Image (cartoon, helix red, strand yellow):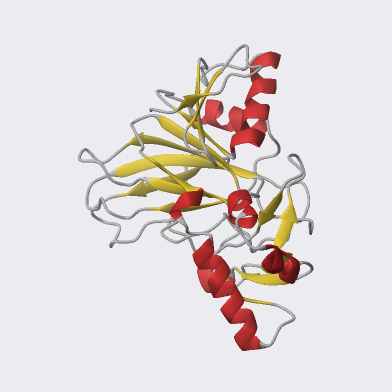
């Protein structure tokens, strides 16, 4: 991957930025073994600084995959009642497998942050893909919600202060899935930065406003968060890993490869607290 090497203060890892706002490829690391204290400290720093981390040529087992997630917190379960992903042989790990029998449907084919409908949404998600379509396709786009917030006008930033949005899981995952109000603008607990906390698939309007106004502002914000200036498109290779921070980025899985096979596994890290207003 072409990028800008950003090894300021990094001793164990190589960190190559993928775009001005989001994403870095991590090198000089072997995720099939436990990390040293220095490697882990640098990995956590890179995660906070870059929002999404990418790893290549990592043939991880379920135990390796789970261990990486557990460095950052407790592994959690999917909040949805109906999803296109499946349980795997290991309860810690979900299976993401799509092929000619998938009826044209895949998981994540909409702009979203994972399970924002939960009272305490996931901190992060780690997706490992071992099988990739032979002719390409199945890329994932990641968007920085820091950059999306920063690009708003000062008047819009002031307008959004104190507003909330209902993140509706029922319309995505079915009955029995949570619906939760979260602040529209949140402050990241580690970086201290403000982020525009929008999930297009879950949010239909902003609360506390006339219905038409709430829908109109939500529509504007969701379209704003899709601006190409804020995103990076990741091209998967066999045995690649993407690890993203659900608190400050959206992502979108491109459905352009069926009936070819795309297959892998994901672990999810539980959040520590509800999103806090900025």
Query: Is 277 left, or right, of 135 in this rendering?
Result: right
In the rendering, at what x and y percent does residue 54 appear?
A: 48, 32
From the viewer's side, name the closer residue of 83 and 146: 146
Report if residue 268 is visible in the image.
no
Quarter of image, res 50:
top right
Answer above or below: position of 67 versus 231.
above
From the viewer's side, name the closer residue of 209 and 199: 209
Looking at the rendered image, the quarter that the N terminus falls into is top left
Report if residue 145 is visible in the image.
yes
- Residue at 63% from the left image edge and 50% from the top image edge: 146
Answer above or below: position of 196 versus 73.
below
In the rendering, at what x and y percent does residue 162 appear?
A: 79, 68
Quarter of image, res 165:
bottom right
Query: Is 22 left, or right, of 160 in this rendering?
Result: left
In the rendering, at what x and y percent does residue 276 appear?
A: 79, 56
Looking at the rendered image, the quarter that the C terminus falls into is bottom right
Q: Residue furthest front?
A: 154
Answer above or below: position of 235 versus 157.
above
Counting labels gives 0
Query: Is 2 left, or right, of 30 in this rendering?
Result: left
Quarter of image, res 52:
top right
From the viewer's side, name the closer residue of 258 and 192: 192
- Residue at 23% from the left image edge and 47% from the top image edge: 260
From the viewer's side, name the closer residue of 276 and 241: 276
In the rendering, at what x and y percent does residue 9 appear?
A: 66, 16
- Residue at 60% from the left image edge and 56% from the top image edge: 151
């Amino acid at each position: 991957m072409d990028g800008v090497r950003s090894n300021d203060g990094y001793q164990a890892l190589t960190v190559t930025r993928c775009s001005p706002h989001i994403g870095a490829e991590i090198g000089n690391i072997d995720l099939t073994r436990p990390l040293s204290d220095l490697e882990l400290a640098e990995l956590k720093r890179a995660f906070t600084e870059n929002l999404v981390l990418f790893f290549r040529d990592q043939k991880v087992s379920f135990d390796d995959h789970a261990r990486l997630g557990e460095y950052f917190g407790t592994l959690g379960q999917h909040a949805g009642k109906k999803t296109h992903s499946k349980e795997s042989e290991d309860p810690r790990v979900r299976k993401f497998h799509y092929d000619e029998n998938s009826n044209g449907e895949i998981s994540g084919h909409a702009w979203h942050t994972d399970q924002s409908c939960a009272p305490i949404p996931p901190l992060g998600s780690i997706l490992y893909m071992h099988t990739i379509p032979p002719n390409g396709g199945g890329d994932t786009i990641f968007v920085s919600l820091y950059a999306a917030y920063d690009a708003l006008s000062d008047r819009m930033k002031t307008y959004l202060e104190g507003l909330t949005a209902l993140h509706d899981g029922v319309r995505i995952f079915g009955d029995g899935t949570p619906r939760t109000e979260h602040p529209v603008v949140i402050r990241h607990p580690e970086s201290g930065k403000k982020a525009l906390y929008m999930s297009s698939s879950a949010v239909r309007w902003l609360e506390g406003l006339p219905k038409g106004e709430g829908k109109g502002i939500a529509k504007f914000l969701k379209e704003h968060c899709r601006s190409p200036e804020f995103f990076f498109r990741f091209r998967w290779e066999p045995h690649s890993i993407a690890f993203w921070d659900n608190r400050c980025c959206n992502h979108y899985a491109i459905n352009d490869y069926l009936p070819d096979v795309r297959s892998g596994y994901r672990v999810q890290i539980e959040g520590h607290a509800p999103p806090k207003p900025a």
